[in-house]
Image (spheres, rainbow, N blue to C red):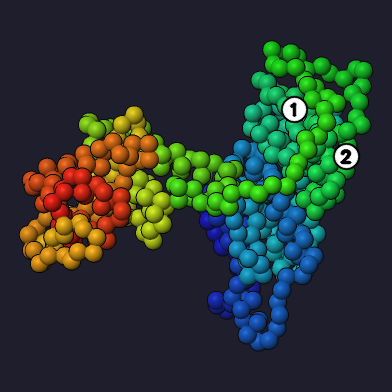
Amino acid sequence: MTERTIHLDPEPRDWRSRKIRVRPSRWYATVELDRDGYVTAERSRGRVRELPAAYVDAVHRVRSASIDCIWYDGYSEGFSWGGEPGWVTLFVQFPHVEAAVSALRIAELDHDYSGLHALAERLVLPVDDWLAPGERELIRGVDFAPPPNVFLKFLRGKAKERGVRLNGRATTGSVWVRPMLSPAQKLVCETSPERYPGWVDRWTEHVDADDAPLRPWVGARGENLSHGAEPVQFRAAETPAIEKCPCGMRLGEAEYGGQTHALDHAAWAFGARVPKNLEWRADLAVVTTQSAVAWRKLAYQVARLPQRENHYDFPSWSHLGEPKVTPDNVRAYLLQTNGSVIGYLNAYDTDKHRHWDLADGSPYGDEDETLRPVIGLVWVADAYRRQGVGATIVQALADDFGCQVADVSWSSPISDAGRRLARRISPSGVWVS
């Protein structure tokens, strides 16, 4: 499927014309009605062109059902779309693209939303049937289509949305499910109707029939170990008001299922994992602006860690385009161990420096025009700090340039951690640029 545009307004067309764009991607196609120019032009004439409530409701029904279908197939990322009324966006699987285009066209031009509702009915999944109370086996090809482990993951998410715990297990060609509602969760659902609109308890009083299928035992732990248990009691208490982690990210980061903070914190603490497509011939790699893009991307990934930790506006490495020569010989030193990059130094060369004795409040010396390497930023993974890693990388920079460590220049201002490192390796003072 190729990208295409379907115009809704007759000739002559201009920036105010409405159009539907179809953009395919790997898992689905985006069908987007662009009415932004049309809305802007109408508002300039004093006409309010908000979408009718029935239109919005029909679009939301299709979007919700179609996103569920895409996740049901195994897609695990999120979705984002432009705001109405300027943009109306749907994400649909490829067999439903033409139906989505036709339904949007009729809804926009004829104010007939039956096509959208019909498409929503066709896409809606029988989630309520899958989460019906009772122990049962759902057969692939009969009750569901994706691989059992993919289907089980999707079903767990839908059960969580409904406040239900899914006792499930995927087998070779089926999924065993037993939706369960704990007393504590039942209390939450009953006292928070805004979180679970239309919620009805179908599980508490359910009793399996005598001829209900029995899930084969495979050595798992016994079931019903919480039968008859009392709900946990909760009390109000004051908690520390800490919003940010030392790695620079916010605590309780919820992006991508709550994994973003955990992954970035691990990289900050233990180093960024080395990609499998990069071969390290020694522990220290020097990446330049002319290196292969895989190396430059790794330097950027590592540079993002100190950027987040210290809340810099920009990362110290941004050379991700075509290989090119920089007049100041920009380069990055990457030190790896145990399969992770634990040390990073960004450097360049310049001939404008002043000497500084590192004493608080002392002035800089006279300007010196000797060409020297400059430390733009040096960073070490948290678990490896205060073990000489930073000094090792600075020494490598001096050796490459052919000078002494004391002749290396430091980019100003120097952070507190950088000043401690500078005093340790050059106690008589440093050059500052």
Q: Is residue 291 visible?
A: no
The disc placed on residue 201 is 2
Which x, y percent locates residue 385?
Answer: 33, 39
Picture layout, residue 408 above or below residue 147: below
Which x, y percent locates residue 324?
Answer: 22, 55
Horizontal relation, residue 338 to residue 50: left or right: left
Closer to the chain start, of discs 1 and 2, is: 1
Residue located 65% across and 56% down the image: 90
Which x, y percent locates residue 242?
Answer: 55, 51
Of helix, strand and loop, which one carries label 1?
Answer: strand
Horizontal relation, residue 402 to residue 77: left or right: left
Closer to us: 248 or 267: 248
Residue type, label 1? Asn
Residue 140 sits in quarter: top right
Q: Is residue 311 visible?
A: yes
Residue located 17% across and 41% down the image: 396
Picture layout, residue 93 above or below residue 151: below
Residue 99 sits in quarter: bottom right
Which residue lies most toward the bottom here?
45
Picture layout, residue 366 above or below residue 289: below
Q: Which residue is mark 1?
A: 167
Q: CA distance from mark 1 to mark 2?
A: 17 Å
Horizontal relation, residue 368 to residue 381: left or right: left
Crowdedness near tag 1: few (<14), some (14–19) or many (≥20) residues, C-alpha within 10 Å: few
